[in-house]
Image (cartoon, rainbow, N blue to C red):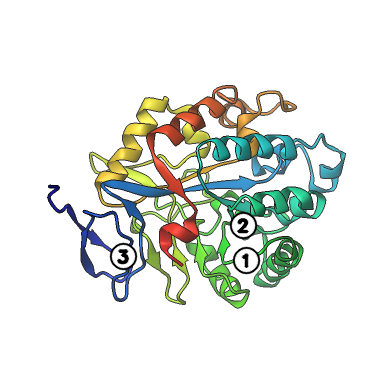
Amino acid sequence: MRLPVTLSLRHIEGRTVVIDLTHGNKFKAAGALRLWYHEQVMINALTFDLEDWFCVSNLSPFISRNEWDLQEQRAYHNTKRILSLLKRYDTRATFFILGWIAERLPELIRDIDSEGHEIATHGYSHRVLSEMTAEDFDRDIARSIEIIRPLIREDIIGFRAPTFSIRADTLWALNVLKKHGIIYDSSVFPISFTAGSKGIPNLTLAVFRHTNGIIEFPLSCAEVLFLRVPCSGGCFFRLFPYNLTRHLLRRVNRDGRPFIFYLHPWEIDPDQPRMKMPFIDSMRHYTNLDRTYGRLERLLQDFQFTSIRKVLGI
């Protein structure tokens, strides 16, 4: 006979909930979002930002948006590889779709949707929010939803800002998101970056609500010796040894938080065109592209994942 397993978790409205995990039941606590568990295994959020290699802000000094259509497009093949891997491990994810990509690859978006993955928006043009006014952003979001929504079966309720550019001086974007029916955002790093393009230091590490009701699922950081170490994917996943990433993500789970993991399809593509750029930028963009697919497969073996929508229970 198994003994009951209980965890004490803090949720978005400050309540403490004790959960019986003996039977792996889903739960819903009054005033709190549901999180999904199976026995003693925490279910984490797996996400992909669907953009092509040339859409990256890191490359914007070298390839303008007016030149995007002139570049070799590799998003279709890379995304298909990811879909095949997810199918093999019977795993669902959230795909934040760039409207510009959906406009050119509508069948790919339909394929992602038909395989049971959540579709959310990454905006249309991949402009960071600090470069836009509220009116610019309103048009950008509206255009992305107008393109993506007819291709999928469910409403779009999630958003991720290009380059995670919701920060203290761009919180005005949250009201624009609410206007367009967005329920949750996943654009905030709860740390500061020297580059200044992203991050809100000293923010809570857990899921929370903004004052206008938008739910925020911050990018995951592990607390190590009073420091916050980003470990939620992207260049950190490529730069850190895999065993270090796994250790940090397990720390997040041990702290009672599901982590959120993100990756871009171009990050599994070592054969993409290479641009000459400053050393630091080149290191961030090209390091370990040949190892990322294998690391992603190991991640799927070591952790349980689903979409953000299901992790949040909305």
- Which amino acid, mark 3? Phe
| Residue 1 percent coordinates (x, y) | 12, 47
Q: Could you say which is closer to the camera, residue 272 or residue 169?
A: 272
Q: Residues within 10 Å of mark 3 (few under 14, many from 20)?
A: some
Q: Is residue 123 left or right of residue 253?
A: right
The residue that label 1 is drawn on is 154
Q: Is residue 243 visible?
A: yes
Q: Secondary structure at mark 1?
A: loop
**Marked residue nearer the N-terminal end (2 or 1):** 2
Outermost residue on the front side: it is 1
229 up-or-down from 152: above or below: above
Q: Is residue 192 visible?
A: no
**Marked residue nearer the N-terminal end (1 or 3):** 3
- Which amino acid, mark 2? Ile
**Residue at left offset 43%, top offset 55%:** 218
Q: Is residue 113 left or right of residue 241?
A: right
In which quadrant of the rendered view does residue 18 lie?
bottom left
**Residue contact between numbered discs 2 and 1, judged by CB atoms under 8 Å:** yes
Q: Residues within 10 Å of mark 2 (few under 14, many from 20)?
A: many
| Residue 180 percent coordinates (x, y) | 63, 74
Q: How far apart are the two marked residues, 1 and 3, measured between alpha carbons? A: 23 Å
Mark 3, mark 2: which one is toward the viewer? 3
Q: Is residue 194 left or right of residue 36?
A: right
| Residue 282 percent coordinates (x, y) | 62, 28
Mark number displayed over residue 27: 3
Q: Secondary structure at mark 2?
A: strand
The residue that label 2 is drawn on is 119
